[in-house]
Image (cartoon, rainbow, N blue to C red):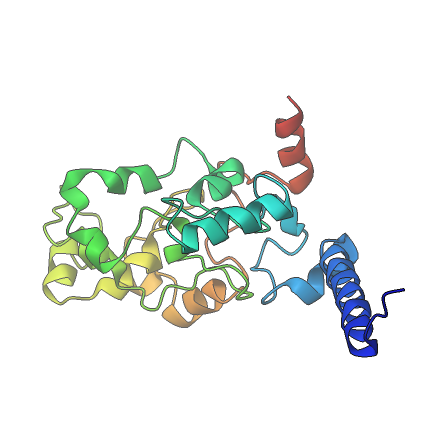
Amino acid sequence: MIKISPLRNRQFIGGVLGLGLGISIFYLLTLDMTEQYVSIGPMNTGHQELSCFTCHADAKGNLLQQVQSNISHAFGMRKEGVDFGTQDVTVDNCLQCHDRPNDRHPTYRFSEPRFSEAIKNIDATTCITCHTEHQEERVSVASINYCMNCHQELEVENDPLDISHKALIDQKSWFTCIQCHDFHGNHKYEVPEKLTDTIPMHIIQNYFNGGEDPYGTDKKYIALSQEDWVKTLEK
């Protein structure tokens, strides 16, 4: 009769228990009730009611296949790795709920060659450049002088503003743009004709940080709710 070393026996039991514990933890972290513990930070303003799966779709293949593929990639047996656990979030995820025909600055426009220099300074081809998620805010871009990257040569015919756009550009007063203009053009409101009547910067910054919308609540298009988004998947 072959005797099994007590040490090897403990190693075997420990391995089985460790594997079981690992699988259990992985399973628990995929449950809806544990989302708040998995999240790297609070959802941005307007996204508080969304579930993780709205943006983080399951990666292709099962867990074992994902591990094997990434190990093969690490050892040079595959050209590319694969998503592990969940798929990477891309601009396409955002557009599933936020795409609209009236967008003045759609992400695809910045893929045109004429914007190649501008996107070196601010990559407007992707939403997360300005809207980093899990920051509990609306806009996370570091500086709001981003209009300077494309509008240096702007000329406005019959300029309605009491201080011309040309003068503001010459003064490099790029922060004033957002005081009049909603970047995506989705708000319905009267643009002021006097610079003194524009939205003060501290109110704009408060809005970016998640505060009240100074442009008003009258919008041309409303982003899809999670319920409406799920219905689009069922069609």
Among all residues in the image, which is located at the extreme front? 1
Q: Quadrant of residue 148?
A: bottom left
**Relative side of 57 to 30, left or right:** left
Q: Residue at x 48, y 63 (%)?
A: 207
Among all residues in the image, which is located at the extreme top? 235
> Viewer-proximal residue, 129 or 150?
129
Q: Where does residue 125 sit, x and y in percent of width and height?
A: 32, 46
**Relative side of 223 to 126, left or right:** right
> Viewer-proximal residue, 111 or 188?
111
Q: Quadrant of the N terminus?
A: bottom right
Q: Residue at x 60, y 51 (%)?
A: 85
Q: Where does residue 82 sit, x and y in percent of width and height?
A: 48, 46
Q: Where does residue 192 sit, x and y in percent of width and height?
A: 33, 53
Label total for image: 0
Among all residues in the image, which is located at the extreme right? 1
**Relative side of 16 to 162, left or right:** right
Q: Residue at x 67, y 25 (%)?
A: 234
> Viewer-proximal residue, 53 or 117?
53
> Viewer-proximal residue, 229 or 208?
229
- Res 158 seen here: no
Q: Quadrant of residue 107?
A: top left
Q: Quadrant of residue 134?
A: bottom right
Q: Quadrant of the C terminus?
A: top right
Q: Where does residue 70 sit, x and y in percent of width and height?
A: 48, 51
**Relative side of 33 to 95, left or right:** right
- Res 179 seen here: yes
Looking at the image, residue 206 lies above or below residue 157: below
